[in-house]
Amino acid sequence: MTTRRIRGTAAALAMAGAVAACSAPGDGGADGGASADSVVIGVPSEPDTLSPLLGYGKDGNSKIFDGLLARDADMRLKPALAKALPEITDGGRTYTYTLRDGVKFSDGEPLTADDVVFTYDTVLDEKTNNTAKSELDAVKDVRADGDDKVVFTLDYPYAAFAARTVLPIVPEHIAGEQDPNTGPFNTKPVGTGPYVLTGWSKGEKLTFKANPDYWGGAPKVKKLTMAIIADDDVRATRLRSGDLDGATLPPNLAATFKDDDGKKTYKATSYDFRAVTLPTGNPVAGDTAIRRALDLAVDRETMVDKILDGAGRPAYGPLPVDDPWFAEDVERLQDLGKAEGILDEAGWKTGKDGIRAKDGRPARFTLYYPSGDKVRQDHALAYASDAKKAGIDVKVESATWEVIEPRMKHDAVLAGFGSTGDPDFGLYTLLHSSLAGDGFNNMALYDNPAVDEALDTGRRGQDPKDREAAYDTLQRELVKNPGYTFLTHIDHMYVLADRWKDLTTQTEPHEHGFASGPWWNVEDWQPAA
């Protein structure tokens, strides 16, 4: 998927730093570092919903729910609600799962195959406002075979389908009685997972208690609080004061804790990239020559060194350079001379003020980034500086998402995307023209028939060589006409009080902090002493 950015309401995010600075996320500050069975984590944003029917937790690690499958620390698929990995028949068109015995929802009702069928049918229903439903495009039918078997029939063999079944399962006896788009299940969910939601103060915190009857065993961490703190500096300050046990931090702030004996820093490699969307309908940003020139004008290496403090890699496309699907020889160094040549040839001539123009229109557009995100701010400013060297004037502005969203189809945005598991995950929703302007899908409204064909081949192909060729073509097309300027792939940094043992991180998607980080499996944590 193009992972839809986890974000809160504008009011919530605008107030988060102020609220957090004057009050602890727990009860009178008692939660922060109190004991090994209570953990408070600071994260920059909150979900819009806690319902998997609308996309929550679809990549796993939702805490409240489980999928048929899950991923281990090395990102390998493993059974969760299913007893085993699926039985695959009919040339890859039929997947059969057998459910684990004795699993119950947190309200005590048993999990059945009907709950699985209800979950997938509702996600795929055209009336359900789930912008990620295209990720299940291959599903033709899902049916129960008794109480403990679920059979998926696909329209076409989809090589990555099993990885899509980490989708959390919801109880039909509760969610089935509500409108999936507006019902109370969105904020008061019930699942089979290791934790139960006990409270949600929008813009401030979410609190969870351990599920004592969890099928995987009762967690040692009995209370989990996710404190919503939009401002990076405020999160770092509260972590340093002991108000938080752990936090998601940008690299430069995480580095300030390196000599703190009581805290440990964790780095997670990721598919998370920062890119500038270049909307096709914008008369400047949508111009192919402008796009190509910007792609050559940016200094990605310096962004990694200076903005990320080395904790990342240059991004020459949506796939990281060390990904096995990354196309050879598409790396591009900054080349201002070539960028200027492209603009000259296309008729973008330099004016007296140093800004180019064509047919009376200056090479100028606005670039938005979300307020409080220092890493995006720094990327946006560096991008504008590099663009100006080529004669393109990029006006950088910060705003809340409520301000940015109505403008996304016309103005550039310093955006973040990236999904793990398979190149289809993320690339299709990022680039396919059929999803142009569908929420956070294809924000650039990119429309390239060759890329669409490559995406369709990659999704439906069974021969690995055919898929590899398709994604190779896609990456080369993005060099010829980049609908986004890809800047960096970011390593995610976390700092956590050193009171638990054997903590790990996974390779992470764009969405992180809330369900990723070293607390991706907090239900398995053990006290260090």
Image: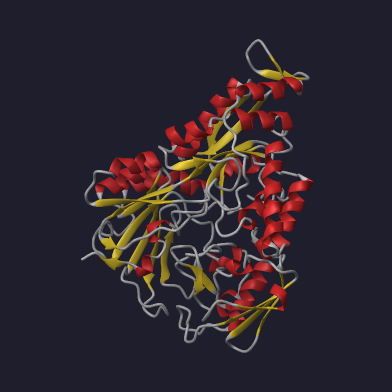
Number of callouts = 0
Of 351 and 27, nearer the camera is: 351
Residue 523 image point, x, y percent: 37, 69
* 219 left or right of 368 in image: left
* 198 left or right of 401 in image: left
Q: Is residue 315 above or below residue 151?
A: above
Q: Please identify the residue farthest to the top as the structure is shown.
A: 352
* 28 left or right of 396 in image: left
Q: Taking the image as drawn, is residue 138 in sight? A: yes
What residue sits 51% from the left and 53% below the top?
Answer: 511
Specify how the rendered protein is coloured.
Answer: secondary structure
Q: Is residue 237 above or below residue 282?
A: below
Of 333 and 264, nearer the camera is: 333
Image quarter of the C terminus: bottom left
Image quarter of the N terminus: bottom right
Q: Please identify the residue farthest to the bottom as the structure is shown.
A: 146
Residue 459 image point, x, y percent: 70, 60
Q: Is residue 406 above or below residue 296?
A: below
Of 74 and 484, nearer the camera is: 74
Of 499 and 372, nearer the camera is: 499
Q: Taking the image as drawn, is residue 129 in sight? A: no
Q: Is residue 380 above or below residue 165?
A: above
What residue sits 59% from the left and 22% below the top?
Answer: 388
* Picture quadrant where residue 156 is located: bottom right
Residue 27 image point, x, y percent: 29, 60
Residue 204 image point, x, y percent: 41, 53
